[in-house]
Image: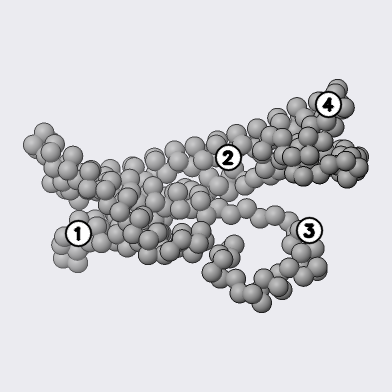
Amino acid sequence: MIPTPQDESKKDLKESHTRSAIRRRLNSERSHSYLKDFVYGAIDGTVTTFAVVSGVAGAALSSKIVIVLGLANLLGDGFSMAVGNYLGTRSEAQQRDQARKREEQHIEKVPEGEREEVRQIFAKKGFHGPELEKVVDVITSDRKQWLDTMIQEELGLSLDGPSPVKAASVTFFAFVLIGFLPLLSFVVNLINPKICADPFWISAVLTGVAFFTIGALKAKYVGQAWLLSALETTGVGGIAAGLAYVVGAFLKDIVH
């Protein structure tokens, strides 16, 4: 977890910026956060599933129909989102690979032109004169460092990225796991109506709790006020569910 500014004390900052701590941090293998993929999948899974629940409830259809449509949406949309995330993340990786190959060709065919690009990049950073030429010489003496510099500084791309498979898996897992909450009360109602006589309102409460919790957890990682983040997420989900309920109620006479 990346600490937020509020979490870091002056003592922590000093300890993390000693020479040995900096060396360990810079030499350690980079790990990618999949928080975005989890939050994206969890929120979308909950929103779309509860939208189905709201629409069917607004049309006054049976719990069985809610479960069938909800599960179909959960698995179908969850897989679709995971595939979309996989392809998007993989496309970014392919873009980096293609950019690296292109820069390798440029260095091979027009090395002086590429050196000039490095020179102008670092001139903009405030280097000049012999100091600038030394920087250019150091960077261009190492082919990998030269390529990495062009990828980051000229093209504005990161050197590596998250695993497409992991990103897709996290999205699907979050979508299905959290997105199942709006259906839980309807499943219980189907098994034993006496335990859960009014599944829609219980579903609404569970969905609200899910939205609120996801928003609060997200805030811890991004440094946002937890209450604001929780209310923001709950509000967005509530609007989507409300629209679906209104549409279902409006079309109620058509399906009966």
Q: Which quarter of the picture shows residue 249?
A: top left
Name the side, left or right, on which 194 lies relative to 218. left
Q: Position of residue 17 (x, y in %)?
A: 73, 68
Q: Nearer the viewer, residue 212 or 78?
A: 212
Q: Residue at 76% across / 37% down in the picture?
A: 121
Name the amino acid type tagged 2.
Thr
Q: Residue at 61% across / 74% down in the picture?
A: 9
Distance, label 4 to label 2, CA atoms, is: 32 Å
Distance, label 3 to label 4, CA atoms, is: 32 Å
Q: Which residue is mark 3?
A: 27
Viewport quadrant of the N terminus? bottom right
Q: Of callouts 3 and 2, which one flags the residue occurring earlier in the amino acid sequence? A: 3
Secondary structure at numbered mark 2: helix
Secondary structure at numbered mark 3: helix
Q: Residue at 66% across / 77% down in the picture?
A: 11
* Callouts 1 and 4 close, C-beta under 8 Å: no
Can residue 57 be seen? yes
Badge nearest the viewer, 1 or 3 = 3
Q: Position of residue 133 (x, y in %)?
A: 89, 40
Q: Of callouts 4 and 2, which one flags the residue occurring earlier in the amino acid sequence? A: 2
Distance, label 3 to label 2, CA atoms, is: 25 Å
Give the number of the disc on residue 89.
2
